[in-house]
Image: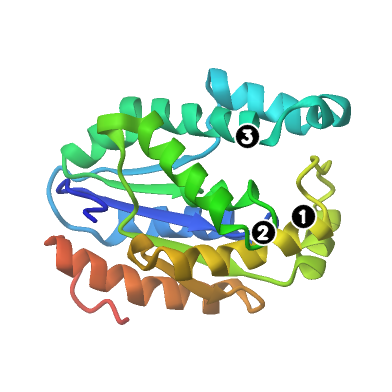
């Protein structure tokens, strides 16, 4: 399967909530802006769900327990797919076509939040629904970094941040999603998923990310400042 047929590079930071993916996505973006030398290449930092129409509806549902309970799980996943379709059409694909680099905080690998634990039938259904929803704007990251962290530790990080939890940010849910990430990677070996131990200092984690990014940049023909160690 062709995951990204465009000249640009698509990178994704992912994992369960509070795993540190947003921190790493920002570091990836900043590093790329500093060290990629190709003239005219821009680096875009973005996220899913977006802050557009469907993304706002998603956050409203996740932030309201009553509304969350009333919403069919498949209908919620359909909203995620619609939000991603719009994101790809308006922002991601145009940048990849121009040869730019896109770093996204989550992409459609996050459909693993939808199925029951290790339910591959539901995963297959969600994958097909996403492909159909995206149509000619279907694209897949050159690499998805899944920052792996025990859910109990992630929840403690979340509490320390002081942020209000939404309806998916619970230990049971995060345990299920963590297992689903592993199952997804085995079921779709083409999905370019790399698991990274997130129970370490931020710099150590990013050092692993940087090694992989350097190889991807080389493979795509991007030039990086000389003397940058892996």
Q: Is residue 213 left or right of residue 64?
A: left
Q: Residues within 10 Å of mark 1 (few under 14, many from 20)?
A: some
Identify the coloring: rainbow
Residue 158 is marked as none
Separation of marks 1 and 3 at Cα, in angstroms: 16 Å
Q: Where does residue 121 sit, x and y in percent of width and height?
A: 55, 53
Q: Where does residue 57 sit, x and y in percent of width and height?
A: 65, 22
Q: Which residue is mark 2?
A: 177
- Which of labels 1 and 3 is toward the front? 3
Q: Residue at x 14, y 53 (%)?
A: 38
Separation of marks 3 and 2 at Cα, in angstroms: 16 Å
Q: Relative to 24, does residue 65 appear above or below in the rendering?
A: above
Q: Is residue 132 left or right of residue 9?
A: right
Q: Residue at x 73, y 72 (%)?
A: 150
Callouts 2 and 1 close, C-beta under 8 Å: yes
Separation of marks 2 and 1 at Cα, in angstroms: 6 Å
Q: Which residue is mark 3?
A: 74
Q: Quick one: label 3 or label 2, which is nearer the N terminus?
A: 3
- Determine whether the residue tagged by mark 1 lies in a helix, strand or loop: helix
- Which of labels 3 and 2 is toward the front? 3
Q: Is residue 189 left or right of residue 117?
A: left
- Determine whether the residue tagged by mark 2 lies in a helix, strand or loop: helix
- Determine whether the residue tagged by mark 3 lies in a helix, strand or loop: helix
Q: Relative to 96, does residue 3 appear above or below in the rendering?
A: below
Q: Which residue is mark 1?
A: 173
Q: Residue at x 14, y 48 (%)?
A: 7
Nearest to the observer: residue 27 or residue 150:
150
**Can residue 168 be seen in the rendering of this structure?**
yes
Q: Where does residue 114 sit, x and y in percent of width and height?
A: 63, 46
């Amino acid at each position: 399967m062709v995951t990204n047929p465009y000249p640009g590079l698509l990178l994704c930071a992912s994992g369960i909530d509070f795993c540190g993916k947003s921190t790493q996505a920002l570091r990836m973006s900043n590093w790329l802006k500093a060290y990629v030398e190709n003239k005219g290449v821009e680096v875009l930092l973005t996220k899913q769900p977006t802050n557009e129409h469907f993304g706002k509806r998603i956050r409203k549902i996740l932030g309201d327990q009553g509304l969350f309970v009333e919403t069919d799980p498949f209908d919620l996943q359909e909203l995620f797919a619609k939000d991603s379709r719009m994101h790809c059409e308006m922002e991601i694909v145009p940048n990849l076509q121009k040869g730019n680099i896109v770093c996204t905080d989550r992409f459609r690998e996050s459909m693993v939040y939808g199925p029951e634990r290790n339910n591959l039938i539901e995963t297959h259904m969600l994958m097909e629904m996403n492909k159909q929803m995206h149509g000619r704007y279907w694209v897949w990251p050159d690499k998805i970094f899944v920052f792996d962290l025990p859910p109990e530790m992630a929840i403690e990080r979340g509490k320390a941040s002081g942020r209000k939890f939404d309806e998916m940010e619970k230990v049971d849910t995060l345990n299920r999603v963590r297992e689903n990430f592993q199952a997804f990677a085995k079921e779709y070996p083409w999905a370019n998923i790399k698991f990274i131990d997130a129970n370490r200092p931020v710099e150590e984690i990013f050092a692993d990310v940087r090694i992989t990014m350097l190889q991807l940049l080389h493979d795509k023909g991007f030039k990086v400042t000389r003397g940058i160690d892996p």
